[in-house]
């Protein structure tokens, strides 16, 4: 029997609320990478570095499926998801 690795689906926002949906198995490390501008040009270009939503999944397959689902949503639905957990859009990375 193999053990599942916990994985996270997360949403980052810029000050102007441009959104980015991602997946990781180490949320704290990934947040540091985003803040350092390493993952890619999109998050660096739009100053996307505030963690506004995340959810934990049991393994990469489940997390990847959820990430794809959320990425397909309209912006309004993503905002409702964020505000269900974080109505003030505070930076949740400070709690990691």
Image: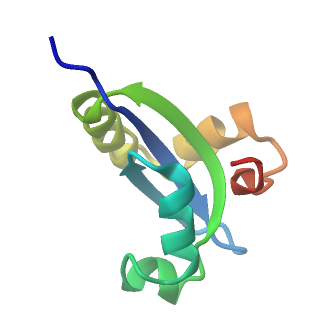
Horizontal side, residue 3 vs residue 84: left or right = left
* In the image, farthest residue toward the right: 88
Q: Above or below — where is 44 with respect to 39? A: below
- In percent of the image, x 56 and y 69: which residue is there? 32
Residue 63: which quarter of the image? Answer: top left
* In the image, farthest residue toward the left: 1
Residue 91: which quarter of the image? Answer: bottom right
Q: Give the image location of residue 15, x and y in percent.
A: 72, 74
Q: Above or below — where is 47 with respect to 30? A: below
- In percent of the image, x 28 and y 24: which residue is there? 4
Q: Give the image location of residue 82, x and y in percent.
A: 65, 42
Question: Quadrant where the N terminus lies?
Answer: top left
Q: Give the image location of residue 57, x and y in percent.
A: 41, 27
Q: Compare residues 35 and 13 and report the one nearer the observer.
A: 35
Q: Give the image location of residue 74, x and y in percent.
A: 45, 47
Residue 2: which quarter of the image? Answer: top left
- In percent of the image, x 69 and y 55: which residue is there? 93
* Tally of marks: 0
Q: Above or below — where is 20 with respect to 70? A: below
Horizontal side, residue 2 vs residue 34: left or right = left
Q: Compare residues 47 and 33 and report the one nearer the observer.
A: 33
Q: How is the image coloured?
A: rainbow
- In percent of the image, x 72 and y 39: which residue is there? 83
């Amino acid at each position: 029997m193999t053990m599942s690795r916990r994985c996270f689906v997360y949403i980052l926002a810029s000050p102007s609320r441009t959104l980015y949906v991602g997946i990781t198995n180490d949320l704290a490390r990934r947040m540091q990478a985003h803040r350092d501008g390493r993952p890619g040009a999109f998050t660096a270009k739009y100053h996307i570095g505030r963690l506004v939503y995340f959810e934990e999944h049991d393994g990469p397959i489940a997390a990847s499926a959820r990430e794809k689902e959320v990425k397909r949503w309209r912006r309004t639905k993503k905002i409702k998801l964020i505000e269900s957990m974080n109505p003030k859009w505070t930076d949740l990375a400070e709690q990691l």
